[in-house]
Amino acid sequence: MSRGNYIAGFAALLMFIPFAPVWSQTVQLPTFQTFSYSGSVLVPDRGSVSLGSVRRSASGRSSRGFGLGPLGSHAGGATNSIGSASVHVTIIDHDAIDRQIRGLPPRGVSSPKSSGAAVASNALEKIDVDAEGKALVRYARQKFREGDTGKAFDAYQLAIRKLTPRLADLAKSEMDRVIPSAQQQVFRRGY
């Protein structure tokens, strides 16, 4: 067969193969937009405030051909977007939580006066400087009874730093009695 016969046979074969219409394809890529806020606001505990928002809108229309019907085509589209920023606040006062767990009064609140004693209006109340250290020793004892030696050691260490020298020595000797020195060295390595 000659080369011309091959081409003619191939062309005849192509005439009988049905062709499907090819449709165009559009891929929409994501878009990102940002805005920023600079300033300060006052927000109460467990409160929230809106810092601002941005709205965006766009629309478009395209026409081709002549007029309406089969000689013309029209396309249109629109998009809307909104972005906002807000703040929600919860204040966590770790010092107040710790004082409550240890059974201490809130900071700044004095201990209640005894009801039977007459106190002069200008007399100063005696303040127990060791109250927090004593509460820490009680907490250490509780943790030791519960089997949590690590927390007991930490509480003893804090108590020793807060107590006056005489009581600090007593707390140190109690800690040495209930927590072996080898175990204390293990706990100290964590610091």
Image (tube, grey):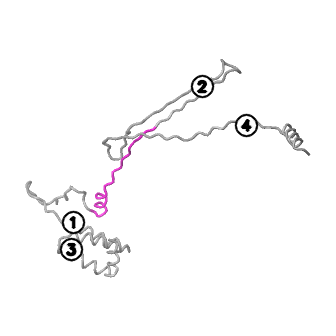
| Kind of element beneath mark 1 | helix
Q: Are marks 3 and 2 in contact (CB under 8 Å)?
A: no
Instruction: Give how far across and how far down residue 84 sits, in percent.
Output: 43, 39
- The magenta region covers 83-103
Q: Are marks 3 and 4 in contact (CB under 8 Å)?
A: no
Q: Which residue is mark 1?
A: 131
| Residue 49 higher or lower than 150, as above or below | above
Instruction: Give how far across and how far down residue 92 sits, in percent.
Output: 33, 54
Q: Which residue is mark 3?
A: 168
- Residue under the image location 16 percent in, 59 percent down: 113
Between circles 3 and 1, the one closer to the viewer is 3
Spatial CA span between label 3 and label 1: 12 Å
Q: Which residue is mark 2?
A: 62
Residue 22 is marked as 4
Q: Residues within 10 Å of mark 3 (few under 14, many from 20)?
A: many
Mark closest to the chain's N terminus, 2 or 4: 4
- Residue under the image location 66 percent in, 18 percent down: 66
Q: Nearer the viewer, residue 24 or 48?
A: 24
Q: Residues within 10 Å of mark 4 (few under 14, many from 20)?
A: few
Spatial CA span between label 1 and label 2: 81 Å
| Kind of element beneath mark 4 | loop
Q: Residues within 10 Å of mark 2 (few under 14, many from 20)?
A: few
| Kind of element beneath mark 3 | helix
Spatial CA span between label 2 and label 4: 23 Å
Spatial CA span between label 3 and label 4: 89 Å
Between circles 3 and 4, the one closer to the viewer is 4
Instruction: Give how far across and how far down residue 20 sits, in percent.
Output: 77, 37
| Kind of element beneath mark 2 | strand
Between circles 1 and 2, the one closer to the viewer is 2
Q: Nearer the viewer, residue 164 or 1?
A: 1
